[in-house]
Image (tube, rainbow, N blue to C red):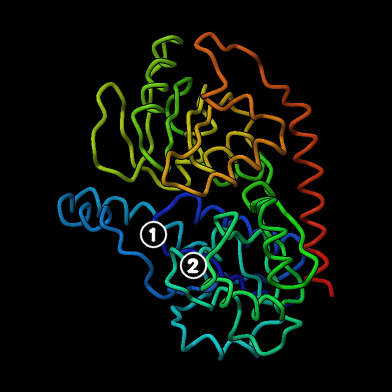
Amino acid sequence: MKKIAILTYVQADNYGALLQAYALKKVVFICGGEAVVLNFKGLPGRTDMKGIIKKVCFPVWNFRIKKNFKSFRDIILKNSFPLKRDNLPALNDKFDIFITGSDQVWNFFGNGFDSSYLLDFVRDNNKKYSYAASFGRPEITPEEEALCAPLLKLFAGISVREDCGVPLAERLSSKSVRRDIDPTLLLTKNEWLEVAQMPDRENYVLLYLMSHNAKIIDYAKKLGQKKGLKVVMITTSPIPRKGIEVLTVTPQQWLGYFLKAKYVVTNSFHGLAFSINFNKDFFVDLLPPPSNVNSRLENLLELTGLKGRLIDNICDNYEEEISWGEVNSIMEKEREKSNNYLKEIITK
């Protein structure tokens, strides 16, 4: 069995980041590889002022968040020891394949221009692959291009997550590039049921946001009032919301809340991905300016034919049901295509 090293974001207290890391590790194992998610903490990126404020002003809440994520991160990082950049070259003889991705591993605006995620420490180019890696944006800066281009040219196989990433990666690498679905979508609803912890409630409006804004919060409240349902918001922010029950939960509980929700309102990519995977009646909003990472939301909506679920496209009495049979058929074909790519990598 080949040993596969996965390099991705796993240190952030973020549901999507940890769940995609868990999923990719699981799927690599299913495909016949012995996978290890590297316990790597990269170069410091942008200063997270909101995170600093939460840590200083809300220590009890911050402690609870850290505790909620730690146990699941420990599961993902089993058999992996803490690594810094200087430790990475020593891994060359320990692994047969290195996979970077998924998530925004090539969005260097956020990770301090850490070329580790371009596998610059791997000596054998035949071992270098990406899976559903994301630049986070349709275009990158000349400085980022200068970093990415020479290193991407050395990859044995390049897979990105968004359609807009394909021409960008092909231009930088001079190679053929494929588009694959996020790892969380590789696991079926039944496979996620094995991980989820169910809440002792059901039939509520679940609000999960990457970026908070009054428009989408107001929409969730109106939906709850119209349907006679409570609005439950999962967040890592300690700020209370009038008329909304605010919770912080473990990743396993996060899955359970999605599974039991009657409706989901979100502007998060992984909020959208799990709503689709779990066949939940959802409503999605694009991130407001100055965000430029909406391509991942738009791509998934386009792929599944669900752009009509954008809040801006919905009137107040919107009741059209989603044709989940058609959506599930699309996702099954995408799942098969992406699984085949991972199998090819592992069995070469």
Quarter of the view holding residue 46: bottom left
Q: Depth check: 62 or 78 in front?
A: 62
Residue 108 is tagged as 2
Q: Secondary structure at mark 2?
A: loop
The vertical placement of 212 against 314, above or below, is below
Q: Nearer the viewer, residue 303 or 84?
A: 303
Q: Which residue is mark 1?
A: 70
* Residue 307 locus on image (x, y percent): 64, 29
22 relative to 220, above or below:
below
* For residue 227, above or below residue 269: above
Looking at the image, the residue that sits furthest to the front is: 142
Residue at (46% x, 10% y) in the render:
227
Element at badge 1? helix
Kindly identify the residue that appears in the image at 68 percent across and 71 percent down: 172
Amino acid type assigned to the residue bearing label 2 in the image: Phe
Distance from label 1 to label 2 (Cα)? 25 Å
State the residue at coordinates (22%, 52%).
Answer: 54
